[in-house]
Amino acid sequence: MTTTAADIAGRLAERPDAVALVESRKGTSRTTRRGELVRHCRHIAQGLRDAGVRPGHKAVVMTRDAHDLTAVSYALVLLGAVPVLIEPRAEVGRCLQDITPDVFIGEPLAHLGRRALGWGRPHVRIPLVTGSAPLPMGRRLVTRAAADGTSHPHARESDGDGPALIAFTSGSTGRPKGAQYRHSTLAGQLDALTTLMDPRPDDVLLAGFLPVALLGPLLGLATVAPAVNHLAPARTSPEEVAGPIREHRATIVLASPAVLTLIARHCARHGVTLPSVRQILSFGAPLRIGLADALREAVPDDAEILSVYGATECLPVSAIGDHDLRASRTAPPAGHSGTCLGRPMPGIRARILDADATGLGEIAVTGPTVSPAYHARPDADATTKSDTDHGVLHRTGDLGRLDDEGRLWFLGRKAHLVTGTGFTLTTEDIEAVADTAPGIRRTALVGVGTAVCQLPVLCVEPLPSTPRASALEAVRAVLKDHPDGHRVGAVLIRTAFPTDPRHNSKIDRMRLAGWAAKRLRGRIR
């Protein structure tokens, strides 16, 4: 099955008077209905065609405006062009070297960056500016159109299962890469999300991550895009996220642990609850029990809280509810440790490659949600992609196991293994236990020193109310009960961990290890 341009147009045309998108900012909101969104997309498609955009063109779309990101991306697909989504903060120049885009569409700030830093030079031939453009940075693209009766382009007939979208990875675990989605990939993601969410006609989705606004309307959901600080999600004002949930009676919340932490803290601090919420989907990093407990206090007893596992190249892969997550922590199967990720989604096959005697190896997946290739990165394809009878097999770079019930267990990134003298530690094995210490927000195990004889160092981020001495005592107490806890050579307090720019949830272990090395200078071989 594929999702072609005609399929997208058809999905949007359903229930034209229903809400498609709500942009919420500082107590105000702007609503776009599904019929309006279709009209805007067709108007934009005409503007793109007039500007010289043609089928097959690669078009970078860089804007923080949820409506413009959604409508412009849909319009490009209607024309047969390929939208390209890149983080506006990390290695944009190198990403554009990989893409060699024909078109650059963005808000004025993005064009300032393009001009000042030479993004896309010399490939970009068609610069188009969304929003107000006080400086002459390119032709202005009108993204909201009034009903004028003008005939605009309809969906272009698809030439089979061709390229539909290129989405760059965040670069939190290496150089960003452009994951190519075909129309069938998008269809697989929509089907998997439909299975996860079981959307209902009156559901309202709060999209805590901007690109989710692209999928919400295609799922038939009224989608609320809050004013998340997309350059630093964890610095968002909590009211900007929790307020729209209450105001628009959101039933589904999809966000990273950093954004969900803002919501949970806001509810606890102000004594408010979120009675409309029936489901929370956490993605971007493992959901910790402490955060799940805090969210439980804010939502109805029968609400579902899911930790969703996946990556830009394969999302979603699996999911587990918070009740099962707690049970897996208190009574894990024999020989298993780390964090349970649940069973793979229907149609997804998970394998463990290069497994050792304990079954620990690299998680690899096949299925309809898997991106078949990276754009212009044959080196990355060679190390992560292979053809099988079940489709492209993607190596995730994550370590894990499969238990007898078919559940995946996550043990951390392959690149983050800590190798000491005669032993190896996986990050998640230690951290999942250390994070349960009272007064602790999260921990991170890093290796300091020369590979193969590293010193395992556990960095600890306590809750603001926890004294440093109490945090150290609590962590050391839980490590005593872990079979490898004695191998941790040092425990260091750091008030705030460096994190990935996209979700502010994945820990930047390279920076953290450098910091730990400076703190422990003299103890490292």
Image: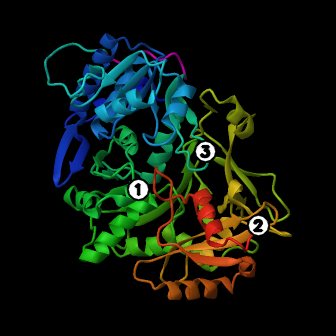
Residue identifier under label 3: 347
Image location of residue 349, percent across then percent down: 67, 47
- The residue sitting at 58% across, 37% down in the picture is 177
Q: Residues within 10 Å of mark 1 (few under 14, many from 20)?
A: many
Image location of residue 52, percent across then percent down: 36, 11
Residue type at tag 3: Gly
Which badge, 1 or 3, comes first in the chain's sequence? Answer: 1
Q: Magenta residues, as a range?
A: 154-161
Dot 1: element: strand
Q: Residues within 10 Å of mark 3 (few under 14, many from 20)?
A: some
Against 414, is 293 above or below? below
Judged from this view, the residue extending furthest toward the front is: 522
- The residue sitting at 28% across, 76% down in the picture is 269
Residue identifier under label 2: 454
The secondary structure making up most of the magenta span is: loop
Q: Is residue 209 magenta?
A: no
Image check: 475 left or right of 283? right
- The residue sitting at 72% across, 61% down in the picture is 417
Q: Nearer the viewer, mark 1 or mark 3?
A: 1
Q: Nearer the viewer, mark 1 or mark 2?
A: 2
Residue identifier under label 1: 255
Question: Residue 350 versus residue 486: which sits nearer the camera?
Answer: 486
